[in-house]
Image: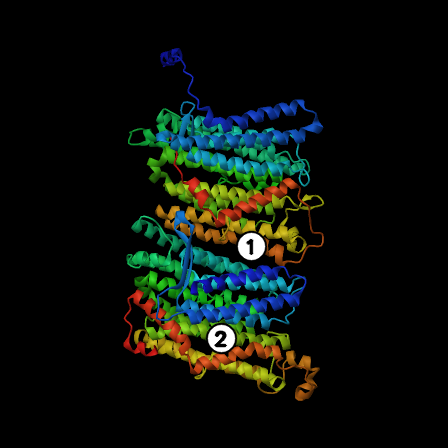
Amino acid sequence: MGTGLLLALLLLPLLGSLGVAFLKHDDLLAKRVTLGVTLLELVLAVLAFTAYSPGGARIQFASSVDWISQVGVHISFGVDGIALVMIGVIALLVPIVVLAGWADKLPQGRSAAGFLSLVLVQEALMVGVFAATDVFLFYVLFEIMLIPMYFLIGGYGGARRQYAAVKFFLYSFLGGLIMLASAIGCYALAADKLGKGTFDWATLVQVVHDAPLETQIWLFFGFFIAFAIKAPLVPLHTWLPDAAEQAPVGIAVILVGVLDKVGTFGFLRYNLPMFPDASKALAPLVMVLGVLGVLYGSLLATGQRDLKRFIAYVSIAHFGFIAIGIFAFTAQAQVGAVSYMVNHSLATGMLILVIGMVIARGGSTSIADYGGMAKLTPLLGGMFLIAGLSTLSLPGTNSFVSEFLVLLGSFPTQPVAAVLATIGMILAALYVLWLYQRIMQGPVRGTALVGISGGPGSATDPEKAKVLDLSGREIAVLAPLVALIVLLGVYPKPVLDVVNPSVTATLTSVGAAVPAAAQEGK
Amino acid sequence: MQEQFLAQAQQQVNAPDIAYGAIAPVLIVLGFACLSVLVEAFVAKERRWGLQIGVAAAAIVLAGASLAAFISSNDAAGGPTGKTGVTTLAGAVSVDKPALFLWGTLLALGVLALLLIADRTVGGDMQTEVFPLFLFALGGMMVFCAANNLLTMFIALEVLSLPLYLMCGLARKRRLISQEAAVKYFLLGAFASAFFLYGLALLYGYAGSVKLADIATAAVGTDRSDTLLFGGLGLLVVGLLFKGSVGPFHTWTPDVYQGAPTSVTAFMAACTKVAAFGGILRVLTVAFQSTQWEWRGVLWGVAIASMAIGAIFGLTQTDVKRMIAYSSVAHAGFLLVGAIAMNTDGLSSTLFYLLAYGFTTIASFGVISLVRSGSGEATDLSQWAGLAKRSPLLAGVFTFLLLALAGIPLTSGFIGKFVVFSAALRDGMAPLVVIALVFSAVAAFFYLRVVVLMYFSEPAEDGPTVSVPGAFTTVAITLGTFVTLLLGVLPGFVLNWASSGGFLS
């Protein structure tokens, strides 16, 4: 049942994209079909959650066939709790993104069908990358995943989209190639030890995890660089602000919400179990990069003038937190990090969507062009505030639980990093609230709004304003996210329960002691 | 001294045994080449074109059939030599597993190249002389891959090179640039041949024999002069690297690729590379394996230089054919990485890479030949802007081929890189592999640039037209693209063939 579900999750969007690709002449039908497919995918994901038994095997729903037997490559899929929640996030975000982009105008000469079939291919590949349990297959999907994203950014993005798309592609491609070198290195180790090489993840973990420290460190870096580019850690982050700025809003959600999580997921699935000694030896380095990311991202977010770049830097700060949580080697911190991966997708995803709605009304991405918008669009203002509060981890919202767990869990092992990262929480309040204040509060001002309202005079008279508040469709887009943000804020157990055993298994394979306190989370 | 020679002359010369079955493919190709010359001489002009295509096609098909027949009988024979192949013509030609694989590759690529050459609907600017020249070149390449002594190798080198020089100058529309390419190729090629010959002479002085196996024997623990050995090896390898357009011996490549008629460029780019690397693999493995620690460092440097030159200069090109030329220099660097991994994986992975690269390249040139403006092919990259809007299918196919050249997964280019690099890594060349991977990423940039141009740029006002391909070109592009995809998804069976056996000395 579970195996079939997982394969269906993989194939459904792929088939859907084939179908949608033929609907070039009927945009509305293409949109409807896509929405249907993605909603069906969501249903499948929910079913998969119910079929998954958190206390069961490390990798569930497993299936495998030989692909290139000469070099021990298989097509094998399976999920652990971490992969499963990420697949859940994908299945949730994609229909939201499709709905959010319903009324977007595409560049001249491009059809909705092309865009949507790329989105569906992207969805299938993202599910695949989280579900792959063969290192070679993972690499293949990791690289292939870049191609639809490249076309989505480059074909449908903003003014400097070509530059952003190529930069995004090259960064990730280079990272992937370095990872490939490491993967081949692991394969060679396996070939020496077992007589025949393999790329099967579980076997490789067995073979590689007790390799000499020096070997481990080299191999660790291959994977680490690829993932550090993906999940952008400072100083490998420079592609993200450009990509997030130039991508269409919905694509930015997928990019930041899901694609970047492949990096942090990779740390957990590949770096820690395969190279435990190297991971422990290099944890201080990751701490430095994590803290740097938190502080640098927060500061740059505070100083941003562009709304979309703002989000990119917020994400960089949050990825710093996640990295700290993962490499703190306590169950609390890691559970926090994994749930942060989910909650960041929800919170930042919603923030991007809201900001996209702001931009759609004002036609400008510059923060200075807005002011007092909540007077014109009170509902949108409220949504902006909710997304912002979740982003700054206000207690009662989902992110608070994660951030708190990360800091609490990393303090015993990495006190300095934990203390420094706490500064990031304070800065988060600064950049979010200040942004909210500038855009939403005060008198209506700024060329984007006043221009629309019909001249400076209308600014004092909101009655005349023509800036519309949220439409029914937009409310439908945001409502599920609001619901989840609040729900997971007060009752995070569903996510934590699924994640906990997988984290414990990861930590066991690293050989880190699981502090007793961490067991409370169960 | 003189008496010695006289004494030798008195000896009876025994005709060597010839395994006709084994070398039948070469004999057929060369025989049909002679036939093709006769056709050229005696058949009326208006009927020549069709007849020549028939002759060339028959040559390749019959050669392929005899190759298949030999392989199946060889496999069935079993036994010590049956499985690995035979050495014939007094040890001058060694028909072993790699040679058979390379012959198969050359014939398959030859079919595609012939299809492009034969299509008059788009190109059609060549005389019928191209067909005999094509067959002679192909025959020379086949001998070159199987040559087991240096003299045979040299003759094969000339047999494959001379027709190629001529073929480069055959364009009737853009005569000047075509003839310039031919002269350049000829002059530089003559230099390279001279290097090869000089190296051969030094090695003969060293080992007292031109047989690869004798050189190998001589190189194992003797007190002969190392200067002769390494001087000879260096000069010989320079000649070989030139043919494989490995940087820094690549200087002819961009000009010749640009100037030659596109179908000839396709043939040259794919098949010459196969032949040259077949030769490099054989020489290094059979003759110089025991001294690998002496020369491998140098070839590391050459491989790095080639990858760097190809990847970096490729970035600055504005002509699509020159860009593919620099790409081929970069690929030569990757191939060399596999060729100097002195293990069985290195051999099989390089063979696989050659096959994969050949198909992708020919299909790419097929696509290039279709994009035309009033004055001929529109090879300037700026003219390709917005091509996807006008002909999405062509742009899609070309994007796929470019991704294959860049080595993106699910294409044969990726599998080729993967097997080559893993062979090199297993032979302890981790730093070289990392460098190669970095240059793969750099090279990916210029392939992407073309994709960006085709998809994301506005079409130029006076943009080129995409001509409707003739049936031949369509078949060639389709086959090349299909093989690129097939080897990317299911490479298993070809990997099996490529790794079925080593060189026979």
Residue B432 in view (yes/no): no
- In front here: B83 or B156? B83
Q: Which of the 4 quarters of the picture holds residue B457?
A: bottom right
Q: Give the crowd class for mark 2: few <14, some 14-19, many >=20 residues within 10 Å.
A: many
Residue A134 in view (yes/no): yes
Q: Which of the 4 quarters of the picture holds residue B186?
A: top right
Q: Which of the 4 quarters of the picture holds residue A25?
A: bottom right
Horizontal and vertical percent for residue A6? 46, 64
Q: Give the crowd class for mark 1: few <14, some 14-19, many >=20 residues within 10 Å.
A: some
Q: Chain of mark 2?
A: A
Residue A492 lies, with reference to residue A264, above or below; the image says below
Q: Residue furthest front?
A: A1
Return the mark for residue A303.
none
- In front here: B253 or B451? B451
Query: What residue is rendered at 70% in x and 43% in y?
Result: B375
The kind of secondary structure element at disc 1 is helix
Do the residues bearing badges 2 and 1 touch, measured as CB atoms within 8 Å?
Answer: no
Horizontal and vertical percent for residue A378? 59, 85
Circle 2 residue: A346
The kind of secondary structure element at disc 2 is helix
Q: Chain of mark 1?
A: B
The amino acid pointed to by label 1 is Leu
Q: Is residue B35 left or right of residue A417?
A: right
Circle 1 residue: B448
The amino acid pointed to by label 2 is Leu
Horizontal and vertical percent for residue B158? 51, 28
Q: Quadrant of the N terminus of chain A?
A: bottom left
Task: Give the mark toward the camera: 2 or 1.
Answer: 2
Query: What residue is rendered at 42% in x and 77% in y?
Result: A424
CA gap between label 2 and label 1 equals: 33 Å
Horizontal and vertical percent for residue B473? 63, 41
- In front here: A445 or A339? A339
